Amino acid sequence: MLNRKQVLRMHLAVSGMLALVLTSAAWAQSSKQPDLRIQALSAQPGKPSVYEIAFTTREALSPEAEFTLEFPTEFDLSHLQIAGSPEMTGGFTLAREKQTVLVKRSGLGQRVAFGTFVRLRLGSIGNPKNFAGSTEVTLQVRASAQSAAAAFAKQRVTFQATEKRE
């Protein structure tokens, strides 16, 4: 049988281990991915590219979640017709008005858990002719039809270098 001192030591050891595990898990989750990344997968000025919007969910996303993106006028959205995601199944509808894009989940996929790293891909968007210009995009996420939209800070688009093929 354990005496009080032994029980107290065991309790402190278990509590310390639990705190270490929870702290490590929280650190790993927070350092895993940036809060928001918007990337053109082809870095040719003035040419079309698939764009990837990557972020960690701040709350669970229902199958009816909506994403609103606002692009500067330097981006050509006239050929934008398709949206997809490896993490969010079920399909999407896409609508655009001027420089604002609305992407809605179709309602057919699975719920996406809080803290999940997701990627939303849009194609095709015309890259700016000059990458030094305004490339900040705003993203708002509505987790469900009943929730208010949550905005991320404006994010500069990064342009992934592409190899020239001969």
Image: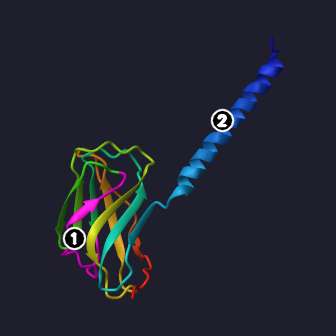
For numbered disc 1, what is the local secondary structure?
loop
Residue 72 in the magenta stretch? The answer is yes
Quarter assignment of residue 155: bottom left
* Left or right, 74 with reference to 30: left
Above or below, 95 relative to 49 = above
Q: Residues within 10 Å of mark 1 (few under 14, many from 20)?
A: some
Residue 121 in the magenta stretch? The answer is no
Which stretch appears magenta? 70-87
Amino acid on which the number 1 mark rests in the picture: Leu
Q: Label 1 belongs to which residue?
A: 80
Of all residues shown, which one is farthest toward the top?
1
Residue at point 80%, 17% (across, down) = 4
Q: Position of residue 51 (x, y in %)?
A: 33, 69
Quarter assignment of residue 127: bottom left
Amino acid on which the number 2 mark rests in the picture: Leu
Count of all numbered marks drawn on residues in the image: 2
For numbered disc 2, what is the local secondary structure?
helix
Of residues 162 and 69, the one nearer the viewer is: 162
Name the N-terminal-most of marks 2 and 1: 2
Q: Position of residue 47 (x, y in %)?
A: 29, 83
Picture quarter with the N terminus: top right
Query: Marks 2 and 1: CB-CB under 8 Å?
Result: no
Of residues 4 and 28, the one nearer the viewer is: 28
Tag of residue 111? none
Q: Residues within 10 Å of mark 2 (few under 14, many from 20)?
A: few
* Left or right, 87 with reference to 91: right
Above or below, 61 relative to 136 = above
Q: Position of residue 125 (x, y in %)?
A: 27, 74
